[in-house]
Image (cartoon, grey):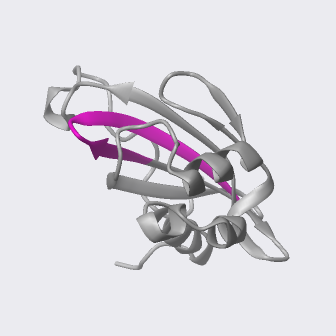
Amino acid sequence: MTGPAPGVAAAIEGELRLLDPLVRASADLLDQVLHPDYREVDTTGRHWERDTIIDLLVSGRAPGPGRLTASLMRGVHLADGLVHLTFDTEARNKRAHRSSLWRLTRAGWLLYYHQATPFDAAPSEVSPGASAAPGPPTGRPSG
């Protein structure tokens, strides 16, 4: 079995960097990962822009449950220079389904858009016909 495509691997690496408290506390490191036009919708439905997110993270005032752990991370190339990741996070018994778009730029792969949706069900508790981690497996879609 082969590993993820290079763009997917780079996006996953970037997403995992963003979970690192040292990266989240550094404006310089966040600047290396977030696209200049970055936007986010958090678990409450609130919209955020790049500069505000960087300020909140670096100052320690970012809303949220604290340090996150990720699971079920998957990625797919949507088009040249565009990767979509989906994954789940948990912190202090609060869970969220997450979706991120990564764009290839001259500076490398940068996070362009992120959205989080809270959920309560464990993967084994998901309704029949629903998926705990929607989307195709890591790599390029077939067809």
Residue 20 higher or lower than 47, as above or below: below
Q: Residue at x 52, y 61 (%)?
A: 24
Residue 23 image point, x, y percent: 52, 68
Tell which of 70 and 126 is nearer to you. Answer: 70
Residue 131 image point, x, y percent: 32, 33
Most common SS among magenta residues? strand
Residue 9 higher or lower than 39, as above or below: below
Residue 20 image point, x, y percent: 43, 66
Q: Residue at x 67, y 28 (%)?
A: 47
**Side (left or right) of 104 relative to 127:** right
**Side (left or right) of 106 relative to 124:** right
- Number of numbered markers: 0
Tell which of 72 and 137 is nearer to you. Answer: 72
Residue 22 image point, x, y percent: 47, 70
Residue 2, quarter of the rendered image: bottom left
Please identify the quadrant where the N terminus is shown: bottom left
Magenta residues? 87-102
**Side (left or right) of 20 relative to 55:** left
Residue 134 higher or lower than 104, as above or below: above
Tell which of 130 and 19 is nearer to you. Answer: 19
Q: Residue furthest left?
A: 124
The answer to whether residue 108 is magenta is: no
Q: Residue at x 49, y 69 (%)?
A: 17
Q: Residue at x 63, y 72 (%)?
A: 29
The answer to whether residue 94 is magenta is: yes
